[in-house]
Image (tube, grey):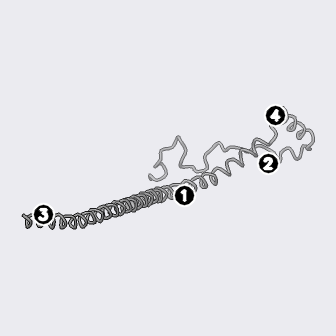
Amino acid sequence: MLAVLLIIVIGSCSSRSRDDPSASFVNVQVDQNRRLAELQHQWQQERKSLYDQRDALEQERARLASQRQREPIIAALILRLGELALCLAPLVLCWVLLRSSPPVCDSELIAETLLLSDILPESRRGDPRLSPPVTPTQPLVPHLLPDSPPNAESSP
């Protein structure tokens, strides 16, 4: 019996020594789990940071692509507006000049004509520079007369 008792006492002593390594193993395991959780948290933060940077780069790429599309359209629009302004400038200038000239009344023209006829001597009244242009009654080209057939001169 003494041997049994001795084996029990020795066995209990050895089990206590086994508890200490298991407790230290549990403590090491808890420490490793905590470090693993910290590393996973850091990894997730870095991954989130990379995703945010990728999204920012994608937004900048889309902005630059739309800007590259818009710039030629705006340049063409500016050129067309410049061409339109250059084409309209003479018309606007003529319109401004016509609007700024004083209106001429028929009565003023009649009075001016009467005064000229009274002032000019008889010899100058027949001056072709002062008379209205004369329209010819006969065409200048004789073969275009309306009465004659077109091949009247060419037939023998």
On residue 75, which mark appears? 1
Q: Is residue 116 above or below residue 73?
A: above
Q: Amino acid at mark 4?
A: Cys
Label 1 secondary element: helix
Mark 1 vs mark 3, foreground winner is 3
Which mark's residue is nearer the viewer, 3 or 4?
3
Mark 3 or mark 4, earlier in chain: 3
CB atoms of marks 2 and 1 within 8 Å = no
The answer to the question of whether label 1 and label 3 lie on touching residues, with beta carbons closer than 8 A, is no
Q: Extreme left residue here?
A: 1
* Left or right side of 30 for 88: right
For the residue labelled by badge 4, is the local secondary structure a helix, a strand or a loop? loop
* Residue at horizontal 54 percent and vertical 47 percent from the top: 144
Q: CA distance from mark 1 to mark 3?
A: 99 Å
The crowd level at tag 1 (other Cα within 10 Å; few <14, some 14-19, many 20+) is few
Q: Is residue 6 left or right of residue 140?
A: left
**Alpha carbon of mark 2 to alpha carbon of mark 3: how far?**
157 Å
**Which numbered tag is attached to residue 128?**
2
Position in image of residue 12 (x %, y %): 17, 63
Q: Which mark is residue 105?
A: 4
Which residue bears the numbered disc 3? 8
Sequence order check, earlier mark of 2 and 3 = 3
Q: Which mark is residue 32?
A: none
Q: Are marks 2 and 4 in contact (CB under 8 Å)?
A: no
Q: What amino acid type should be assigned to the residue bearing mark 2? A: Pro
What whole-number distance in Å separates the C-alpha atoms at marks 3 and 4? 143 Å
Q: Secondary structure at mark 3?
A: helix
Q: Nearer the viewer, mark 2 or mark 1?
A: 1
- At x 9% / y 66%, what residue is drawn? 2
